[in-house]
Image (cartoon, grey):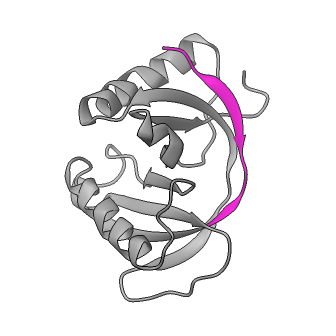
Amino acid sequence: MEFKIETLQPVRIVYVRRRGVYGPENAKAMEQLKAWARERGLLTEAAVLYGMPLDHPQAVSAEQCRYDACIVTGEPIGAEEGVFERRFEGGTYAVFRVPHTAEGMQAAWAAAFPALQKAGCRLSDQPAVERYAGTQLLQGFCELCVPIEADGV
């Protein structure tokens, strides 16, 4: 599986969090975030959204796994009920271009880590993220971004 190395810049994000088993329910959090962003004129072709699984299911019970559906914002929004704000620190990431389908994303999650291991990359402790950028989505793609050590390539 091919990937490119990219430095994701630190950004301010607004997010909706859900707890539970990772999978189809994550899409509901993303739809909730999109509805919120659409009402505020933030959901444009230039928008960048992230899906962030924050816990490893082998280290945390499935019911307690956290998933944040996020949108990048340029300025403070202020917390609202069910919608929060924080900073995503970014870092060095291996970026895999993936068909924007549930099957495509599942296959990418399964193949990315073996591909990075084979390439000799060392993982960092930042969260892996699914990146959804307006222009790529129009082409039917999204990205899986896996954090690696800057000197680990």
- Horizontal side, residue 123 vs residue 9: left or right: left
For residue 153, above or below residue 136: above
User: Which segment did they paint magenta?
Assistant: 1-12
Q: x and y percent of residue 152 in the render?
A: 73, 25
Residue 133 can be seen in this image: no
| Quarter in which the C terminus is drawn | top right
Residue drawn at the location 40% of the way across and 20% of the way down: 111
Q: x and y percent of residue 114 in the render?
A: 46, 17
Residue drawn at the location 33% of the way across and 54% of the way down: 60
Residue 134 can be seen in this image: yes
Is residue 101 covered in magenta?
Answer: no
**Residue at the farthest top position:** 118
For residue 151, above or below residue 147: above
Residue drawn at the location 58% of the way across and 83% of the way down: 77
Q: x and y percent of residue 131 in the render?
A: 50, 45
For residue 31, above or below residue 121: below
Determine the image quadrant of residue 67: bottom left
Q: x and y percent of residue 123 in the render?
A: 60, 33
- Horizontal side, residue 115 vs residue 121: left or right: left
For residue 116, above or below residue 37: above
- Horizontal side, residue 151 vs residue 76: left or right: right
Residue drawn at the location 38% of the way across and 30% of the way down: 109
